[in-house]
Image (tube, rainbow, N blue to C red):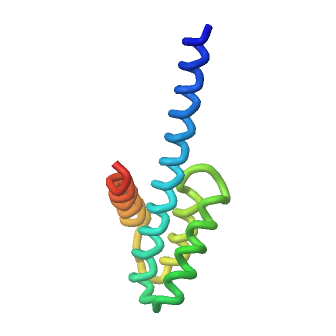
Amino acid sequence: MNTFEDRKKSFEKKFAHDEELQFKINARKNKYIAEWVSDVLEFNEDQKKQYIQDVIKADFAEAGDEDVFRKIKSDLIDKNINDNEIRSKMKELNEKAKSDFM
């Protein structure tokens, strides 16, 4: 019975570690996305810091990336950047965020 409990605890620790890692990757990805949009919108440093916080907060609206996508799409509407470009950049920056932790 002790072996079963040890395995159970190991799986629980791994699950908690994996969830924490995914949270960190998502936060880093959102930071990178916000920095990219800030550069496109030519924000100064203070505006950039605030925008990063706004994008991170937007990610808590719902599970997945659609909430962040909608926010940055609406913010970039005057810059004529299409959905495919935004999604491509989000994918690229997600991979960059993953590589930061792997």
Residue at image position (41%, 61%) is: 90
Look at the picture and state if 18 lies above or below 58.
Answer: above
Closer-to-camera residue (101/95) = 101
Closer-to-camera residue (57/83) = 57
Look at the picture and state if 38 lies above or below 89.
Answer: below
Q: How many marks?
A: 0
Image coords of residue 80 (percent x, y): 41, 78
Residue at image position (55%, 63%) is: 68
Residue at image position (58%, 25%) is: 9
Image coords of residue 41 (percent x, y): 44, 85
Image coords of residue 51 (percent x, y): 55, 79
User: Looking at the image, which residue sits at the far front?
Assistant: 2
User: Looking at the image, which residue sits at the far bottom?
Assistant: 44
User: Looking at the image, which residue sits at the far right?
Assistant: 61
Image coords of residue 44 (percent x, y): 46, 92
Residue at image position (54%, 47%) is: 20
Left or right: 84, with 52 as reference point: left
Screen quadrant of the N terminus: top right
Look at the picture and state if 48 lies above or below 96.
Answer: below
